[in-house]
Amino acid sequence: TLYFTRVLYYIMSTMTSHRTTMHLRSAPSTWTPPKFKSQADYVLDASAIFELDLDGQKYALKLFHDNGDPGYTEKGRDLNRFRCELNAYEKLLASGVYAGGLVPKFYGYIDRMDPAAFRPAFQHFARDKLKPRAILLEYLQMQELELREDSDALYPQAIEVMQEIHRAGVHHRDIYPKNLLLVRGNPDRLVWIDFDVATTFTDFGSEQLARCDHEISLV
């Protein structure tokens, strides 16, 4: 249908990835069209996260509201949440942090999506001034970390993961339990998510290192 054709066009043609070249392709007769869940899994003030099924594989699509670029603070910190998250994931991708399963794998981003083409899933974005942007991430079966008997064994891992994120040149800036999720497996692992207020840096000077130490103390 036209709906699924548009989904395929955006996902396979307009997605930008630094490691994988995505090409528009026609659908074979046995191809299963991509589907969005009718509602977002998580709805936040600035974004919503959707479960996307494409060719039998699940992805997480984080879609950002856009009512105009908020710009930067007087000190130069970026206030655009899409840009913050994109810059952070590009840094984490380049450094290989995701390869260890420490953060969700980043597949690429979509510059603009038309909410009218994806009703009813994107209906909450229809009244925004600008069409939303999105990032495509690995879909993980996760749960928020709760206090359990083995919490003491997992929390040192949370610190180690955050240190890896810092070594990649990323400050998370949103250190809360809701952003630390548990992925069940053998063994269990912790994953830091939600980098939409993160900042990136290349100079490991005293100011940046002090911020790293502060974030570790918050963990």
Image (spheres, rainbow, N blue to C red):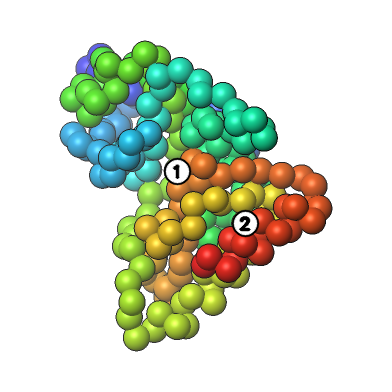
Q: Position of residue 31 (x, y in %)?
A: 30, 32
Q: In the image, is residue 90 above or below residue 120? A: below
Crowdedness near tag 2: few (<14), some (14–19) or many (≥20) residues, C-alpha within 10 Å? many
Report if the CB atoms under discs 2 and 1 are less than 8 Å apart.
no
- Mark 2 secondary-structure assignment: helix
Q: Position of residue 27 (x, y in %)?
A: 34, 24
Which residue occupies the foreground of this view, 74 or 61? 74
Q: Is residue 190 above or below residue 72?
A: below
Q: Going 58% across and 68% down the picture, which residue do you hit?
A: 217
The answer to whether residue 15 is visible is no
| Number of other residues with Cα within 10 Å of mark 1, as a class: few under 14, some 14 to 19, many 20 or more | many
Residue at 52%, 30% in the rendered image: 80
* Nearer mark to the viewer, of 2 and 1: 2
Q: In this view of the protein, which residue sits in the foreground, 132 or 70?
A: 70
The residue that mark 2 highlights is 165
Q: Dot 1 lies on which element?
A: strand
Looking at this view, is 2 or 134 the one in front? 134
Residue located 29% across and 32% down the image = 34
Q: Quadrant of the N terminus?
A: top left
Please give the name of the residue rendered at 49% of the width and 57% of the height, measured from the top-left corner.
175
Picture quadrant where residue 181 is located: bottom left
- Say what amino acid the circle numbered 2 marks: Ile
- Inspect this view and state whether residue 130 appears: yes
Residue indicated by mark 1: 137
